[in-house]
Amino acid sequence: MSIPRVCTLLRTTATRTATPIGLSTSRIRQHIQLPRPTLWVSKPSKIQKMTLITMNQSLIDRLKNDGVIPDVIDEFSPSAFVQAEFPSGKEIQLGNTLKVAATQEQPKVIVTPDNVSLESDDTRYTLCLTDPDAASRDDPKWAEFCHWLVTGIKLPSSGPLDFKNSKELLEYMGPAPPEKTGKHRYVLLLFKNGKKEPQKLDGRKKWGFEDHKTRVGARHYAKKYDLELVGANFFLCQNEKQD
């Protein structure tokens, strides 16, 4: 299933409105047990708002179950659905396991805000992919390890994110979990930009922060540059040699 079919944004010529369908597909429903799809044009009804609350809570529960909360991020209120598909055809589905070979090329990412009518034309976003389990989940001495960092992103009217007019602060690097280190979590995060301009990292390990604490990364970067977390997704990968 391609991303455009999984998650479609609908716009009118007069107002910026959307139809969030993304996380209601049957394949993702298997992972987080979402309710039936919700459709709205502008202002959601009370029932639709309750459905959004249920979907958001399901996402948070999934992030907690795999320790993304609190290892990588604090608990938050999602305001956008973030999905991604690699050129291999494999999708990121909230904790599914993918083969390393299927994740080596930069994925297509599609974002569905829960209410695009409130979005400003000046609103920009920052996207990242981070590994909190480098070198391993039991020994995260290099964590977090940043695999991708792009800022200045403007949400398109439809389809995947277009990075042509954005600023890639760190090019995409596919997962490369070491041998015998088990499954690593690879967390895709979307932040809304604040008043500060995000800058390049000094390195991938620990996101370039000179800190001896474990799992220094996206959360610290977001705090430094006034970024607001609005969406998240993640997948698992491990080296084929585990014995």
Image (spheres, rainbow, N blue to C red):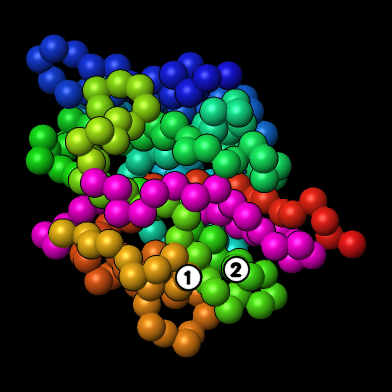
Q: Where is residue 112 in the image (x, y as percent from the top left)?
A: 35, 32
* Residue denoted by label 2: 134
Decide: is 176 above or below 211: above
Count of numbered circles on the image? 2
- First in sequence: mark 1 or mark 2? 2
Q: Give the residue at the far right of this rendering.
A: 243
Q: Quadrant of the N terminus?
A: top right
Can the viewer see residue 51 in this picture? Answer: no
Label 2 secondary element? loop
Tell me the magenta residue range.
167-196
Camera-side residue: 182 or 53?
Answer: 182
Q: What residue do we see at 60% from left, 28% from top?
A: 88
Q: Are the residues at dot 1 and dot 2 in contact (C-beta closer than 8 Å)?
A: yes
Label 1 secondary element? loop
Dot 1 crowding, Cα within 10 Å, few <14, some 14–19, many 20+: many
Q: What residue do we see at 41% from left, 85% from top?
A: 211
> Quick check: is 181 in the magenta stretch?
yes
Q: What residue do we see at 10% from left, 41% from top?
A: 122
Can the viewer see residue 204 in this picture? Answer: yes
Amino acid at pointer 1: Lys
Amino acid at pointer 2: Ala
Decide: is 86 above or below 99: above
* Residue denoted by label 1: 205
Q: Position of residue 183 (x, y in %)?
A: 71, 58
Q: In this view, does 174 lie to the left or right of 206?
A: right
CA distance separating discs 1 and 2: 8 Å
